[in-house]
Amino acid sequence: MKNFIRYLLQKTLSFKNYLFLFSLYSIRTIEAGKYEREFLHFIKIIKGDGLILDVGANIGITAAPLAKHHPHAQVHAFEPISENFSTLQRIVNYLKIKNIKLFNIALGSEDGTLKMIMPIRGNSRMQGLSKAYEEGAGEKGTIYDVPLKKLDHIYPFETNISAMKIDVENFELEVLRGSVALLKRNKPMIYCELWDNENRTSVFELLKNIGYQSFTFNNETGSLQPVALREGLPAGNFFFIHS
């Protein structure tokens, strides 16, 4: 049913107008405190006025609240998919957000080009599930070839990065592998979505070796609690804080 309604809205409004209105609605829902309590907690505990990186900024649903809640910080938002990026630009202009810089690229463990896909489910385009394309997976969708960069090459000397939000649909390990020097130098707090697979295990190991401790958000207490990687641990959002 959701896919059918989404399809009707995309067809009626046009895809670009649907993305813009959906982004505005989601941003206002987050700011009203009715959605994404984990993310709101992340915003709340970011310290100082350093640089905040939004990796996988999509259509601005997280980038806008980050910039608005930290007006003295600078937000750098990375989004490789052209339609998503256009919506991100439109949102920033519409909301008159000044402390944000946009990058129309993907991030990974090397510089080059990345093939990506925006999946189609039930005839509707799923912009929030855009991801690295897997040959032979047989997934239906729009294919893109996008520029790929390492964060270590974008910020070779930066020492004022205070926080990173990463949501790149199971490409998080590659992003972090391309950010090791940055992480060691800046020690930013990381808010990261991870699937339940081998990549997640590798992310935990990589960050532990750099000196990070891992946490999840407890909805009942409204605070962070330490987490140990174990069998049966569900997919979700994790906080990584340098010890």
Image: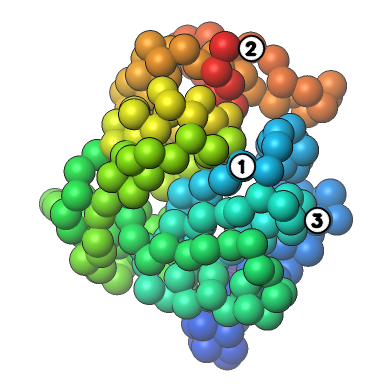
| Residue 56 percent across, percent down from the top left | 46, 53
Q: Is residue 100 above or below residue 207?
A: below
The numbered mark at residue 112 is none
- Sequence order check, earlier mark of 1 and 3: 3
Give the total of numbered labels. Answer: 3
| Residue 45 visible from this viewpoint | yes
Amino acid, disc 3? Glu
- Sequence order check, earlier mark of 3 and 2: 3
Amino acid, disc 1? Gly
* Residue shown at 48% from the left, 65% from the top: 102
Cα distance in 3D space between marks 1 and 3:
22 Å
| Viewer-proximal residue among 153 and 146 | 153
Between circles 1 and 3, the one closer to the viewer is 1
- Indicate the quadrant containing the C terminus: top left, top right, bottom left or bottom right: top right
* Residue shown at 53% from the left, 9% from the top: 228
Amino acid, disc 2? Pro
Which residue in the protein does label 1 denote?
Answer: 50
| Viewer-proximal residue among 89 and 127 | 89
Q: Secondary structure at mark 1?
A: loop
Which residue in the protein does label 2 denote?
Answer: 226
Task: Give left or right: position of 158 versus 144.
Answer: right
Q: Quadrant of residue 43?
A: top right
Which residue in the protein does label 3 denote?
Answer: 31
Task: Give left or right: position of 121 versus 19.
Answer: left
Task: Give left or right: position of 147 versus 86.
Answer: left
